Image (cartoon, rainbow, N blue to C red):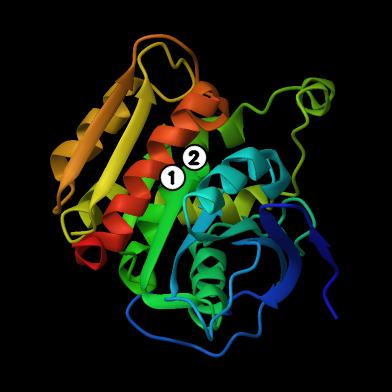
Amino acid sequence: MPETVHNTAVHVEGLRFRSLPEDTRGARAPASGFILAGTLFVPAGADYKKSAPLPGLVVGHGAGSNRNRHEEFCRTACGKGMAVMALDMRGHGESGGEADGPLHRDIVAAVEVLRSHPLVDPNRIGYRGSSMGGYYGLAAALSARFAAMALLCPANERILIHALNNPPPAEELLARGLEARFNVQKFRSYLQNMEILDEAADIDTPTLLVHARQDTVVPLRVTLELAERLGGDTEVFILNGGDHSTAQSDPLIHQRVSGWLIERLLGDARA
């Protein structure tokens, strides 16, 4: 049985589930891949018998990060009325396996778990991802059928390949609380055969793009190029200050992003 913790506003539950074993964009497959770790946040007192189904939200982290680093955002989003699942992608945090390329399968698996939850409206599932998590949100978008996405300083293949080829010293990563298990050869091969901008035109999901103007890890131009390619309603929010981590850690940005998401996920339900 999962362990649970309660506080006055949010019910928090640890989850374990399997990733998808093969590329499922365009088709569903049985879940029999890596064991993944997630944390589910739902409003305390939510009752599927007495309340309308909640919008759902999956939260994806950046390279070397993990789901626990996004807890403050998850609690903020849950406070807006969403059921929120933070995910450790393969090779990260408490999830199994190695980061070997197709991490979007882990996001799709998390979406399917959330979609089947009795408190969640299966047609109102959103996504919030930062950096590498933004990239894989795009890769998962078609098969996950997101109703809305918020992507914070999303990376592209070139940024991720550069990071693989030029990793910071292990001591620096540990000092920043970053740690992961990568299969560098498989990851690089996967990225070399991908072009997320070519897929973006087929993604018609309403999308909020957030980027710090002074981001030196993922330049602002990466988000601007993506905004031009996306096929759906797209908003760009540029931060005049801050760096690569600001959008994913600033409480004011948490409020703005979660507010945007709940408005898009509820849509006509609020009319």
- Residue 84: image location, x then y, percent: 56, 59
- Please tell me the numbered disc located at residue 134: 1
- Where on the picture, by quarter, is residue 106? bottom right
For image coordinates 86% across by 69% down, the residue present is 3
SS type, badge 1: helix
For image coordinates 66% across by 62% down, the residue present is 44
For image coordinates 57% across by 77% down, the residue present is 113
- Whether residue 194 is visible: no
SS type, badge 2: strand
How many residues crowd mark 1 within 10 Å: few (<14), some (14–19), many (20+)? many
The quadrant the C terminus occupies is bottom left
Amino acid on which the number 1 mark rests in the picture: Gly
The number of numbered badges drawn on the structure is 2
Image position of 5 (left or right of 36)? right
Judge by depth and name the residue closer to the eye, 72 or 61.
Answer: 72
For image coordinates 51% across by 81% down, the residue present is 50
- Residue 251: image location, x then y, percent: 54, 27
Up the image or down, 41 lies above or below 233; here it is below
- Residue 92: image location, x then y, percent: 72, 51
Judge by depth and name the residue closer to the eye, 174 or 151.
Answer: 151
- Residue 256: image location, x then y, percent: 39, 34
Contact between marks 1 and 2 (CB within 8 A): the answer is: yes
- Please tell me the numbered disc located at residue 130: 2
Up the image or down, 216 lies above or below 19; here it is above
Judge by depth and name the residue closer to the eye, 235 or 174.
Answer: 235
Distance, label 1 to label 2, CA atoms, is 5 Å
Judge by depth and name the residue closer to the eye, 179 or 268.
Answer: 268
- Whether residue 115 is visible: yes
The quadrant the N terminus occupies is bottom right
Amino acid on which the number 2 mark rests in the picture: Ser
How many residues crowd mark 2 within 10 Å: few (<14), some (14–19), many (20+)? many
Image position of 33 (left or right of 200)? right
